[in-house]
Image (spheres, rainbow, N blue to C red):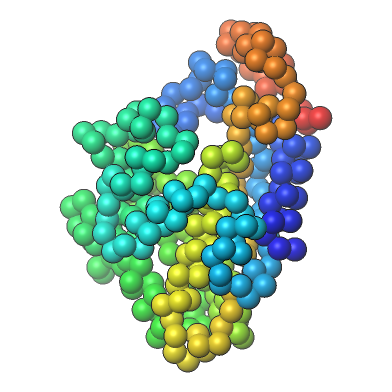
Amino acid sequence: MDLKHAIDHTLILFKNKANLIRRETWQGLDVRHKPDMATHELVGHSVVADLLGRRVLTYFQDQIGPDLPWADDHFAERISGQPLNPPPSEEWWPHAPQGNATFKDKGIFSHTYPERFWPKEAGDKPRGIRYPIGDYADFVNLLAREPYTRQAYFPIWHPEDTGNVQGVRTPCTLGYHLLLTGSECDITYYIRSCDLLRHFRNDIYFAVRFLVETMNRLRNGPWSTAKPGTFRMHISSLHCFRNDYYQLFGGQNGRQIAATEGRVRHARGPVEGIQTAAGSGRRRLP
């Protein structure tokens, strides 16, 4: 199955199997009393696709349908070698609410992907417990030294995110694992949380570009003939907000949604098919 069909399969599965769930926070903000922030969720979903040995970006752009040109602009920031915060492309992200101002503290974000790609020069120049921390260049160098290594995991989730002690936004992406077997390099992409409408296609595109970019930087030994192999994306929570769900799949109109929200706002526990994260007895959507 290629990426296009894998994405289509996910959309069909989401429409038929996602549950309506209410959680405490979103992007570090308290949403317990905002019923419109309840989300339709598909938990523990995996996307698996054959990349068919392709490296041409226009092929993947057609297959995936990311937000262009923004997605290419932002990926260029990720691999720029600079821990940009904020990255310039946040100014023209097509889904930015009020210019992302809600999520900034003194003009910067709690994290950015360019920072996580190049952490050596970010913030207070952090160190590991015993050894210096690595960055994307070190990741590529490892694959150059040991093409068939099983250690080629590039983390986006860092120890400072554990427990979210500061109560801030944390990365949705956990990390990328590359594995060369024979002449094919597979990528396994781990992500804890993914918005179906705003991020799903972009996140797939970024992961594929991560694989292709890394392979393009590796030209010697088995890398000279290696091809992209299998794409695997493991998503803990694939979700979309209630209004987004109706936008994507049809259903209730705005008046019906508002009426339902009014009932949920004063509810304790699951009401009108909404499940709290700690609840049970999930209702399947039609």
Residue at 44% x, 56% y is 72
- Residue in the image at 67% along x and 22% along y: 274
Specify whether residue 164 is in view: no
Question: In which quarter of the view is residue 282 placed?
Answer: top right
Farthest residue in the left direction? Answer: 124
* Side (left or right) of 255 relative to 136: right
Viewer-proximal residue, 225 or 158? 225
What is the x, y in percent for residue 111?
Answer: 33, 46
Say whether residue 51 is left or right of residue 150: right
The front one of 5 and 159 is: 5
Is 37 drawn above or below residue 159 in the view shown?
above
| Residue 146 placement: quadrant | bottom left
Horizontal and vertical percent for residue 135? 32, 66
Residue 161: where, in percent of width, then height?
37, 46
Q: Is residue 242 left or right of residue 202?
A: right
Q: Residue, x 62% and y 24% (percent of image)?
A: 243
Would you place residue 260 above or below residue 9 in this image? Answer: above
- Quadrant of res 253: top right
Vertical side of 270 occupied by 192: above or below:
below
Q: Quadrant of the N terminus?
A: bottom right
The percent position of residue 136, horizontal first and vertical second, equals: 36, 67
Q: Is residue 268 visible?
A: yes
* Residue positioned 31% across, 47% down in the render: 88
Front position in the image: 112 or 224: 224
